Amino acid sequence: MTLKPGANTLKGMRPAFADFDSRTLLVGFDSAWTPNNSGALVGVLRSDGGQIEELGLPQVVNYLEAGEAILSWQNQTKPATTIVLLDQPTIVPNFSGQRPVENLVASPVSRRYGGVQPANTERVEMFGEDAPVWRFLDQFGGAADPLEPVKDTAVLETYPVLTMIALGWSLPHSARPTGRLPKYNPERRSTFTISDWDHVCQRTLSELDAFGLQELARWLGGLSDSRSPRKIDQDRLDSCICLLTALHLADQRECMMVGDTDTGYIVVPFGDFLRDELHARCISTGRTPKEWVRSFILGR
């Protein structure tokens, strides 16, 4: 159904974030996670007055290629600032188990029949000393603090599943008032359904079209029509969901930071019902909600 589009620690603080009337490169990166895997990357340029220039369709990349693509965009477009929303943990100080942020978000995710992978340095290919994510972060100034004004390049951790919950993309389910998460990973043949795939494509299409990204919206319409999507198609779709959070940030819409900059965080668009669920999880685990779940507007 095609629609017609209408590092383990923070690397230090940065000076004030530039005025949003300046050119801002926005990047969504559904990461490769390990040295031998590929992910997907997509970028747009937000110009003076909020106009957005598309920089092509999502491209399949490993970590090295992602860094090269971002540097190429920066060299070509000369943005005042760059915001990268990365779907992989950027702060992982723990050797084993979950980070606190994963313990928190696992509650609303599991309530919708989803799961959260734990991040720890025992998972050497992903988070060990030589994992590619740390070289990528070093290349762009380290893990940024979402609550601090920033300049130049800011890499922030996000999570497409939590973005879908925040934006109300859950599907109805008779046993769960909260609904369920879409099952749209083509590699998981036992749970994947084409209707769920279409749902995520169409919701992403609608959101990006509202920002005026007609090329990406048309491409997502074609992706939605695919009856045999591949895992790399999901990676490219997820990069668009990462980009959506970057667009919310750059548009100075209210967003949410779950976790902290010592043990790890996740940034997604704001959703009041998600905030309430996370607050309840904080209370049930003996945490102070305002210290672990913060709403914010970038640059304010």
Image: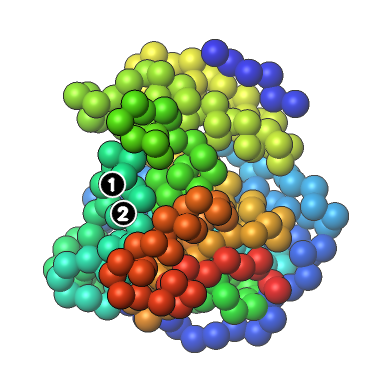
Q: Please report the residue visible at 47 percent of the width from the left and 42 percent of the height from the top.
A: 164
For label 1, the SS is helix
Could you tell me if the residues under marks 1 and 2 are in contact, i.e. CB atoms within 8 Å?
yes
From the top left corner, tell me how far across and down residue 127 is, in percent. 24, 67
Q: Quadrant of residue 249?
A: bottom right
Q: Amino acid at mark 2?
A: Ser
Q: Quadrant of residue 278?
A: bottom left
Q: Is residue 76 left or right of residue 235?
A: right
Q: Please report the residue visible at 55 percent of the width from the left and 53 percent of the height from the top.
A: 272
Q: Is residue 268 left or right of residue 122?
A: right
For label 2, the SS is helix
Say which quadrant the C terminus sits in: bottom right
Q: Quadrant of residue 262?
A: bottom left
Instruction: Assess disc 1: are there few (<14), some (14-19) or many (≥20) residues with their C-alpha within 10 Å of its C-alpha.
Output: few
According to the image, label 2 marks what residue?
107
From the top left corner, tell me how far across and down residue 273 is, in percent. 50, 50
Q: Nearer the viewer, residue 138 or 149?
A: 149
Q: Residue furthest right?
A: 49
> Can the viewer see residue 28 in this picture?
no
According to the image, label 1 marks what residue?
110
Q: Is residue 220 above or below residue 168?
A: above
Q: Please report the residue visible at 34 percent of the width from the left and 26 percent of the height from the top.
A: 174
Q: Is residue 184 left or right of residue 84?
A: left
Q: Amino acid at mark 1?
A: Ser
Q: Is residue 253 above or below residue 17?
A: above
From the top left corner, tell me how far across and down residue 169 is, in percent. 49, 36
